[in-house]
Image (cartoon, rainbow, N blue to C red):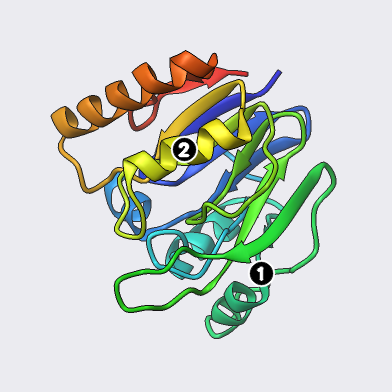
């Protein structure tokens, strides 16, 4: 069994027998979340270089307060963190696999590298991409994004066909806006037997 907890935006933690893994420690979480509730983290997985997914200050905070914290990402993020004298690896910790894809095109036309991570038999975090081809039983699904749409996100989930979806990447919405968009996704994905598990900031569930 694994406990999946949502911090803010795309930042999730997953706790199982291997310890706690934190996905995408971005600046929204570092600035807005009660970090005293995070708990000890053993692994940090970062999907790409954008600041809402990786804050060097947050990563350093996790390292400083933990014991033997390991950080993993693609080469672009490893280089970025290296500029802050933070060590990270492009390798994979045990029980984790990945797909190297591209970030969906943003309004500037850029498509940086993006690494979709899967904690095997638990959860897949695709980062900011619709290109991953596989998923674990639970899929973290971006729902309100400047590089896509809720419609495309729902199509992405239907294509991969996870058992459950955890909505992410909706920081920009009000509470009422998040509720509306999640409700829309829930009603559509239910037709394919996919359960949407909405988590407010700090909420968790067991998968």
Give whichever of 165, 190 is nearer the camera.
190
Of 45 and 198, nearer the camera is: 198
Seen from this angle, which residue lies furthest right?
A: 94
Query: Measured from the top left, where is residue 120 in percent x and y?
Result: 77, 36
Front: mark 2 or 1: 2
What SS does tag 1 mark? loop
Give residue 155's mark: 2
Query: Mark 1 highlights which residue?
Result: 74
Please name whichever residue, 104 or 55, is drawn nearer the observer in this view of the structure.
Answer: 104
Q: Is residue 201 above or below residue 143?
A: above
Q: Position of residue 108 (x, y in %)?
A: 31, 78
User: Quarter-wise, where is residue 154 in the image?
Assistant: top left
Image spot of residue 173 (x, y percent): 19, 42
Q: Residue at x 29, y 24 (%)?
A: 184
In the depicted view, which residue is nearer to us: 84 or 178? 178
The quarter holding residue 203 reads top left
Image coords of residue 124 (percent x, y): 63, 40
Do we see residue 68 in this rendering?
A: no
Q: Earlier in the sequence, mark 2 or mark 1?
A: 1
Residue drawn at x 69%, y 33% is 136
Residue 102 in the figure: left or right of residue 35:
right
Q: Is residue 87 above or below residue 144?
A: below
In the image, residue 29 above or below residue 114 = above
Residue found 47% across the figure and 56% down from its top: 128
- How dense is the environment of label 2, judged by Cα within 10 Å: few (below 14), some, or many (20 and up)? some
Q: How many marks?
A: 2
Task: Determine crowd level at label 1: few under 14, some 14-19, many 20+ residues with C-alpha closer than 10 A.
Answer: many
Q: Which mark is residue 90?
A: none
Q: Dot 2 lies on which element?
A: helix
Residue 67 visible somewhere in the drawing: yes
Position of the N terminus, as image quadrant, is top right
């Amino acid at each position: 069994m694994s406990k999946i907890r949502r911090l803010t935006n795309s930042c999730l933690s997953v706790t199982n027998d291997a310890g706690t893994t934190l996905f995408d420690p971005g600046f929204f979480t570092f600035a807005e979340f009660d970090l005293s509730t995070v708990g000890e983290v053993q692994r940090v997985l970062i999907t790409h270089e954008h600041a809402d997914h990786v804050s060097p200050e947050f990563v350093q905070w996790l390292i400083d307060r933990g014991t033997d914290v390991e950080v993993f990402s693609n080469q672009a993020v490893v280089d970025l963190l290296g500029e802050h004298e933070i060590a990270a690896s492009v390798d994979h910790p045990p029980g984790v696999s990945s797909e190297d894809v591209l970030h969906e095109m943003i309004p500037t036309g850029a498509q940086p590298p993006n690494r979709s991570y899967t904690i095997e038999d638990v959860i897949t975090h695709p980062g900011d991409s619709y290109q991953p081809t596989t998923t674990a039983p639970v899929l973290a699904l971006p729902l309100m994004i400047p590089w896509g749409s809720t419609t495309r996100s729902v199509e992405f989930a239907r294509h991969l066909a996870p058992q459950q979806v955890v909505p992410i990447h909706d920081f920009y919405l009000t509470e009422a806006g998040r509720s509306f968009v999640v409700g829309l996704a829930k009603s559509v994905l239910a037709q394919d037997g996919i359960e949407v598990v909405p988590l407010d900031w700090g909420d968790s569930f067991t998968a």
